[in-house]
Amino acid sequence: MARLDVWLWSVRLFKTRSMATNAVRGGHVRLNGDPVKPARVIKPGDRVTVKEPGWVREFEVVQLLTKRVGHTVAIEAYVDRSPERPSHLSVPVGRRDRGAGRPTKRDRRAIDHLIGRDERDHLPDEDWHP
C-alpha cells in the first residue's frame, strides 16, 4: 500500500512530499480521472494525471514505492503515457560562455531583435515625469 502523495514524491515527480501533497489538494493531480485526496491508496495499474503549466502528463503505476529512490529505479515504477511536450515549452535558453561578461550594446540589440523586443520597450513613456 502506498499513498498517492508519497508515491509521487518517491518516483521524483515532485521535489518534496509537501509539494506533492499541495498539488493533489489543489486539484492538479487526478487518479483514474477523478480528483482525490493526498492520502488515497494507489495500486499497480492506476493512472495518475499531473497538470503542469502548458500541458498534462499521464502515468501508469507499475510499482509501489514508499521511499524516495534514485532516478534509474524511479522510472521503472511507472510508464509515462504523456503526449509529446508542446514545442513552445521547449524554447532553448540563451546562454553565454562563462567569463564572457556582460553583452555589448551590439549583442544586446541582437538579443532584443531575436526575442522580438522593440529597442524602446525599456524606456519610460514620453509623458512620464519623475
Image (cartoon, rainbow, N blue to C red):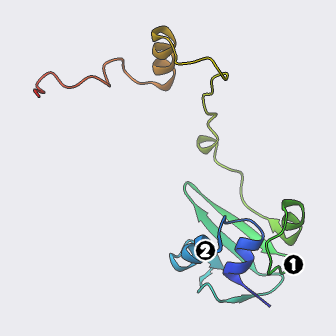
Q: Is mark 1 on a helix, strand or loop?
A: loop
Q: In this view, does 79 lie above or below 101?
A: below
Label 2 or label 1, whichever comes before in sequence order: 2
Left or right of 91? Residue 3 is right
The residue sitting at 86% across, 76% down in the picture is: 62
Q: Nearer the viewer, residue 123 or 98?
A: 98
Q: Which amino acid does label 1 sit on?
A: Gln
Q: Is mark 2 on a helix, strand or loop?
A: strand
Label 1: which residue?
63
Q: Quadrant of residue 70?
A: bottom right
Determine whether 22 is above or below 53 in the image.
Answer: below
Left or right of 37? Residue 2 is: right
Residue 13 horizontal/vertical position (percent): 70, 65
Q: Which mark, by number, is residue 111?
A: none
* Circle 2 residue: 29
**Residue in the image at 62% along x and 77% along y:** 30
x 80%, y 91%: residue = 1
Structural distance between the alpha carbons of marks 2 and 1: 18 Å
Relative height, residue 27 to residue 130 (above, below): below
Label 2, residues with CA under 10 Å away: few <14, some 14-19, many ≥20:
many
Relative to 30, does residue 80 appear above or below in the rendering? above
Residue most toward the front? Answer: 99
